Image (cartoon, rainbow, N blue to C red):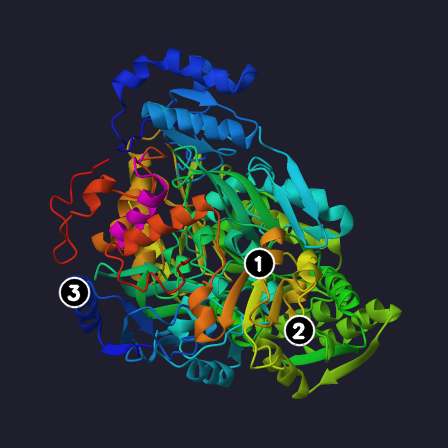
Amino acid sequence: MSGMTVSMPTPDAVTIARRAEIAAALRAIVPGEGVVEGEDGRRAFASDGLTAYATSPLAVVLPRRTSEVAAVLSYCHAQGIRVVPRGAGTSLSGGALPLADGVLVGLSRMSAILDIDYDNRVAVVQPGVTNLAITQAVEGRGFYYAPDPSSQIACTVGGNVAENSGGVHCLKYGLTTNNALGVELVMMDGEIVRLGGKALESSDHDMLSVVIGSEGLLGVVTEVTVRILPRPMTARALLLGFGSVDDAGRCVGAVIGAGVIPAGMEMMDRPAIHAAEAFVGVGYPMDAEALLIVEVDGVVAECQHLSVEIGEMAKACGATSIRASADEAERLAFWAGRKAAFPAMSRIAPDYYCMDGTIPRGALPEVLARIAALSDEHGLAVANVFHAGDGNLHPLILYDANRDGEVERAEAFGADILKLCVEVGGVLTGEHGVGVEKRDLMGTMFTDIDLAHQQRVKCAFDPDLLMNPGKVFPTLHRCAELGRVHVHGGRTAFPELPRF
Amino acid sequence: MKAPSPFAAPTTTAELVAAICSARDERRVVELRGAGTKAGMGDPRRERAIIDLRGFAGIIDYEPRELVLTAGAGTPLAEIERLLAANGQMLAFEPTGGTIGGVVAAGTSGPRRPFAGGVRDHVLGIEGVSGRGEAFKAGGRVVKNVTGYDIARLMTGSWGRLAAITSVSIKVLPKPRAEATLLIENLEDRAGLVLMARAAGSSAEITGAAHAPSVGTLLRLEGFGPSVAARADMLLALCADGGEPHLIEGEDSPALWREVRVASGLPADLPLWRVTGPATAASRLTEGLAGAMWIYDWAGALVWIAAPEDIDVRAAPSAAGGQASLVRASEDMRARIPALHPEPTATAALRARIKAGFDPAGILDPDRFAARR
């Protein structure tokens, strides 16, 4: 799939002409196979998970340690060369989309687990360690790392920090920001800072928090300290079918209203249920308009008690089918369909566009009804998967890139969905990040003054705006200018000009 | 000693903008204040005028099933806690403070912090006015939100030095249906710390772990009745080798933790420090402090230390990767010793640049915690 363009900072021709010299300088810092200069090699890094966009970087460098990252950034800073960091490249919002005149710094070779401290219940890892690898390293002692994005087998913890990743169990156990205690960060000028550490918190304004979710714009994370938790004794999943989204939504509200926070609570609509069942065949109810998968975990007494209570609430909300997992194998099977929901879409359409927005939970029936109307309007089918526990919605827009104009229609449909999320009191992105994909919609949520306050944080870390420009924010004033931008009534002059 | 003069008590954002703009134009340093419960922290001799933010009070939005509450920053914490309790909900991080805005600005969390998260983990969004005199918002009213930089969380622990917060959206959680505390008496500090670590690393899912040398080791269990009972049995098995365990139920359990939250039992006439660090360093933090008394919380990751004025409480946390905040002391001591722990040059420089972005004129209480003289 190709052909889409998004307006990015104009590449600097002089830098591009110096590619060989720059690659040689990088090779002096990261020898051996650490620098990719050839065209084929660079093209392999041209896209991340948002495959609609592809740009080969100026060069790729793959450092192995913090000192190499610092030397690379210091060099680029001195030369005025832009930098784009990359973890596993699984971003769904174009967060790792390269710049033609930018050095792509890939962290995949920094994949060591540096310290597992069971007494303090933390692990210290390099940014290229995959999310699942942390759990695998500590599971022998009965621990795990709680945030579990569905890409956890591939995505890196550095990327998790960039996107404040969640996962099914973030409802009970929190997001990356609630589980990361510290980072080591190399800033664009090569300076290394440590924010947080093994202690639970600092007493001054919380700079660690602003780095988490900063989408690779404030620096390159070279070390992460995370909390590890004791594994719950057991877990049980409930498969609840409903005759309408309304009923399923009411059940979600009832569960939370009763003071129960399940470990996970996911919803799928009819198209998603059917696609998943066709793909994995786990026995989802085919007559249901909405399916809730609810997981409870803890000691046996807790799971048993909660299973019964949730089942009763589901019945009271009109559930048409209720199944509770009898053993671990069945629990995993219940989840298999949900976990396969995205790839399952490729069976019903050549392409799909996964959206990500968050809404207040109670707005779900209204939002789904309006998404159905938008589906008719744009002439494209849609399936919905929903983190019911926290209102994070993933509409999957189905299309065929080979059919004229369908890519554009899919993008327009997606933008309408995101605006709808903001309209009902939600936000543009719950976990995938703004990246390039939602950059130009930031104005629907924030005024120019709001964005200026955010950009000044950026200027504190990267005053020359060399780190990952073109992402997240639609307009980037030069830092020195920011003080002089006159904002009248929340509007800047010439707001329609994209400025990098 | 100069008494801070009242400067403004705005009740609308426009009034607050005007107050900050005129402070900026007059180059007048201001202290942003809610109920002033923590006014005893920081340099008492700094010249500043008070902007009283209690006028921004009131519940703005509360939908229990959405697990979010939005309120004016000046809303009394007690009012919020009463409202939440009436709906079977709570602020899981057990704050102390007078107003919800002050709770966020001070960022101090109570005993449940290691298990349920702290203030920063529950802040979802804020509205406020920066030192530039500009009204802005950050974050939102939902938990899953990665739209732009997390400036709402950046405000946690900012002590009114980045912006005046006018409203806060905060995550709320169900109040547990049952609670019990295992009190183990007669354990030495080290044994208490070991037991707390073991309990925190077990599947008992404790939500409090404190050790007060004069009282004992406390382990809290919360949840549904049958679950609490089963987990209490698990904990009893863990304490098999030492101390005398008693199970405390009913109202006595929350009463105990209210006392832990405010470190009661420490002498009120000694300077008070709040020290955070890795739990494994806890016993080192209290070593050799002649004439001092202390309480461990957060399974050892927090130590309240009441120590005579001449004792250097900061040396041990500095060596152990922790921090010591001076929470209560004589005016003279507060003038000599900066309230917040010193930090490395690179971190301090970054912090100063972030502050300059929000408050270029340096009017928002820049010297409250300044390292001195």
Q: Which mark is residue B26?
A: 3
Q: Quadrant of the N terminus of chain B?
A: bottom left
Q: Which mark is residue A200?
A: 1
What segment carries the magenta color?
Answer: A450-465
Same subunit, tags 3 and 2: yes
How far separated are the C-alphas under marks 3 and 1? Answer: 40 Å
Above or below, B215 against B338 in this view is: below
| First in sequence: mark 3 vs mark 2 | 3
Q: Which mark is residue B291?
A: 2
How far separated are the C-alphas under marks 3 and 2? Answer: 47 Å
Estimate how packed mark 1 is, as few (under 14), some (14 to 19) or many (20 or more) residues with alpha carbons within 10 Å.
many
Name which quarter of the figure residue A330 lies in: bottom right
Residue for point 80% across, 69% down = B234
Foreground label between 1 and 2? 2
Residue for point 34% across, 45% down = A460
Foreground label between 3 and 1? 3
**Disc 3 on helix, strand or loop?**
loop
| Front residue (pair B259, A60) | B259
Above or below, A85 against B289 in this view is: above
